[in-house]
Amino acid sequence: MKDSLIELITAPKTYPEMIWMVIPLVIVTFVMTFYFGMYKKEQLGWNTAVGNSLVLIFVSIDLLRHIFNLTLPGSVLNFGEVPFKTVVACLIFVEGIALMFINMMHFLPKRISFAISAPLPINITAYIVMTIVYTEMVFDWITLLAAVIFFVILYLILKMVQTGERILLRKIAKARIEEEKAEIATTKETLAKQKKEIALKEKVMRKEEELEKLAKAKLKSENKKHKKKAPAKKKSNKQKSSKNSGKKKSKTKKSKKKKS
């Protein structure tokens, strides 16, 4: 069983032509794992389940291509040379078609359909079948048990990655909240300072307005006093002018008398 498990894990290294199909499966598995780690409340969705079922169809077509090209040039007779691998590839194709229609028509309940069509079981199934077809591994109960153990190990690893991601995201969220609190506190302080400055400016403006009012009142009172003094001066001037005219008249009379 240990040898079968090691062979499952190291199959892409032994058979490099597998890498071209393994890399997309690995990328999709980790991306979806990180996505559902970030958005824990989100479910898979029927459209995503249909898309995941198409992975099995594409992988089965690649496996049939591999069997067809076992000889140079490729031949249909190669399917008869390796009947077990051909049957496995065809079964994966049928499974992909069945899952696609089940998810498209919503035949099964959400929990069952989403559990079957999740990225991890789909991609692990595709990887194990690719290992059986590409390598010379004998598919028996030991290989099946090794595949189950491989699935459990990978599932646990991805769950650990999800939990680590969620812990990291919580810490980042807490740090952001603390930063926002600090920004709010600083904005409150600046607003309080601005309010104080505005209040001081308003006080200064009020005092200036009061001083202007007092100055205007003083000017009005002074203007009133000047207006009252002005007619008195006019009267005194008239009196003086009348006295001067009287004096002039008396002088002219005296001069006339002397002449006569």
Image (spheres, rainbow, N blue to C red):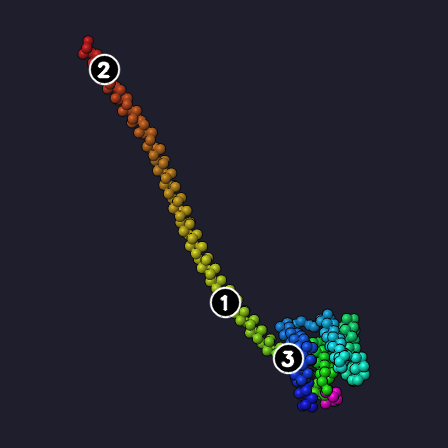
Examine the rendering and report whether any part of residue 108 can be seen: no
Residue position for label 2: 252
Nearest the camera: 214 or 108? Answer: 108
Residue at far left of view: 258
Residue at far front of view: 73
Residue at (27, 24) in percent of width and height: 240
Residue at (73, 87) in percent of width and height: 136
- N-terminal-most mark, 3 or 1: 3
Query: Mark 3, residues whose alpha carbon is within 10 Å: few (<14), some, or many (≥20)?
Result: some
Task: Name the amino acid, label 1.
Answer: Ala
Would residue 77 appear left or right of 137 to someone viewing this image?
A: right
Q: Which secondary structure class fits the magenta region best?
A: loop
Residue 159 picture location, percent across and down: 64, 79
Q: CA distance from mark 3 to mark 2?
A: 137 Å
Q: Which residues are magenta?
A: 137-142
Image quarter hosting the N terminus? bottom right
Q: Is residue 236 above or below residue 55?
A: above
